[in-house]
Amino acid sequence: MSQDNLAKLECTQCHTINYHDHRNKKTVKTRLEMKKHCKRCKKHTLHKETK
């Protein structure tokens, strides 16, 4: 598994990094944004990719 394609997803509410996801940097130029369940907030919130 390549570490280059690994993206950290951070909760926009509590700013915890909950998920790691793979993305193809050649085809996807924008940062990932998806609704995921946050264990700390205990609800579905928007998670954005961090550096």
Image: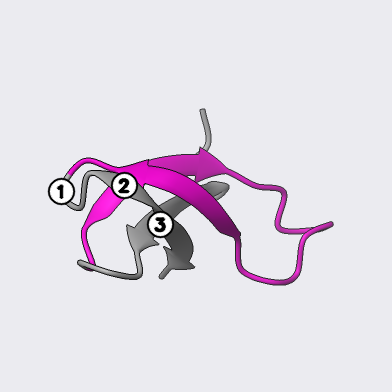
Q: Residue at x 22, y 44 (%)?
A: 42
Residue 28: numbered disc: none
**Mark 3–mark 2 contact, CB under 8 Å?**
yes
Give the residue number, with chain letter if any, for mark 2.
Answer: 43
Which stretch is magenta?
15-39
Q: Residue at x 53, y 36 (%)?
A: 2
| Distance between mark 3 and mark 1 Cα atoms | 11 Å
The amino acid at mark 1 is: Arg
The amino acid at mark 3 is: Thr
Q: Mark 3: give few (<14), some (14-19) or many (20+) Cα within 10 Å.
A: some
| Distance between mark 2 and mark 1 Cα atoms | 8 Å
The part of the image, by quadrant, that contains residue 15 is: bottom left
Give the residue number, with chain letter if any, for mark 3.
Answer: 45
Q: How many marks?
A: 3
The amino acid at mark 2 is: Lys
Q: In the shown orientation, is residue 38 left or right of residue 1?
A: left
- Residue 27 lies, in percent from the top left, at 84, 57
Q: Nearer the viewer, mark 2 or mark 1?
A: 2
Q: Residue at x 20, y 66 (%)?
A: 14
- Residue 11 lies, in percent from the top left, at 33, 61
Give the residue number, with chain letter if any, for mark 1.
Answer: 40
As drawn, 2 above or below 47:
above
- Residue 44 lies, in percent from the top left, at 40, 48
Label 1: state its secondary structure.
loop
Q: Mark 2: give few (<14), some (14-19) or many (20+) Cα within 10 Å.
A: few
Q: Mark 1: give few (<14), some (14-19) or many (20+) Cα within 10 Å.
A: few
